[in-house]
Amino acid sequence: MSHIYEALQRAEAERKSATHEDVITFDPRNSKDTLEAFAEPSEGAIAIAEKAPLPATDASFLIDVPRRPWNPSFDRLPGLQKSGAGVEQFRSLRSRLQEFRDLKSLKSLLVSSGMPREGKSFIAANLALNLARHKNSKVLLIDGDMRCSSLHQYLGCDCNPGLADYLSGKAGIQEVMQYAEEVKDRDPVVSAVLNNLAFIPGGDGGDRAADLSGSKRIDELLATAAPYFDWIVVDSPPVLLVSDAVNLARSCDAVLLVARAGITTFPVAQRAQYELKASNIIGFVLNAVDKSVITESYYYRYDGKTE
Ligand SMILES: Nc1ncnc2c1ncn2[C@@H]1O[C@H](COP(=O)(O)OP(=O)(O)OP(=O)(O)O)[C@@H](O)[C@H]1O
Ligand SMILES: [Mg+2]
């Protein structure tokens, strides 16, 4: 009881302190900054469960990750905007995840849904960026859709080498991982968020995607990366069409399912949940809800007219 109460209190404190100034101001690839940040978290930084100091000998791991040119697609990334309904929605989602994490171990999260175009990649990309807005929060985003990768389009970067190359043994972890190259005139808020986000694109899995997603190397990748990141968000293909998402889900701590308002039918959502029943499904995100519905219910509550 008291644990839940504390978790809710922390979530509330996070909600109140989550402003644009809360973005990270250190470069996660810089071992000195990283170690200092762990030793003395800045005032107002939100406590993250399970955050253990990195062993000094391992701090060079992220330094070997290359920086590549990124040109984010801002119109598809409300998670990168300064304010607005989209930012608020992703902030709420982040708070809910934080509550889960306070109760149970949670670092790697697979985003899935039953059918194509329900918004898995949209949610995965924006959630990862929103998690990366946090002070000292290091996030790894992985495109687990090796048949039809799209996260590189959201971030405006290369798709190769990617996860398929790592899983097939053609490349090592640091070769397939990338950070955004620094751009001089980029908005400082955007730069700070991108500085905290590492990305593994899908690469070209083609027909081998199902076999690759079932490879033990995915467990190795997640286990190797886990000590360096606070969150690992993995996108996936539709669970009702191919087996890849079920395979990837086995290696992740939890699954977040996506349903698209007005598109996803109840039987499809139910079957998606059934397919992933062996994994830890922590909830559904209802994506693309009509803005007027959100605004109306907010004002009703604010005016005290309804609960
Ligand atoms: N909430 C949203 N607001 C605006 N656009 C959205 C939203 N959700 C998804 N989209 C857009 O809808 C399209 C389909 O979304 P997305 O690619 O995320 O679906 P998906 O479930 O990953 O599909 P697939 O299974 O084919 O990979 C994309 O162009 C995406 O940018
Ligand atoms: Mg997708």
Image: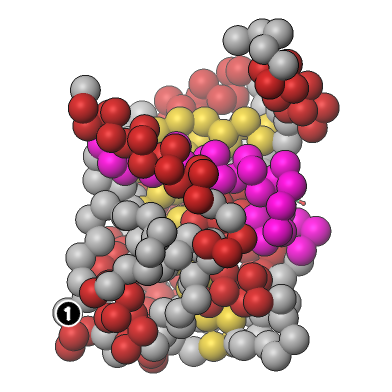
The span picked out in magenta is 74-103
Q: Residue at x 49, y 56 (%)?
A: 131
Q: Say which residue appears at 39% left-offset and 88% top-offset.
A: 30
Of residue 145 and residue 56, the one placed in the foreground of this image is 56
Crowding at mark 1 (Cα within 10 Å: few <14, some 14-19, many 20+):
few
Residue under pointer 1: 55
Q: Position of residue 184 (x, y in %)?
A: 70, 90
Residue 143, visible in the rendered structure? no
Give the residue displayed 65% in from the left and 71% down from the top. 190
Q: Check the picture and name the quadrant holding the N terminus.
A: top left
Q: Give left or right: position of 155 versus 213.
A: right
Nearer the observer, 174 or 18: 18
Is 156 left, or right, of 138 in this rendering?
right
- Which residue lies at the image location 32% right of the left edge and 55% below the top edge? 47
Coloration of the structure image: secondary structure
The quadrant in which residue 203 appears is bottom right
For badge 1, the amino acid type reads Pro
Q: Main secondary structure of the magenta part?
A: helix
Q: Residue furthest front?
A: 43
Secondary structure of the residue carrying numbered label 1: loop
Picture layout, residue 5 above or below residue 116: above
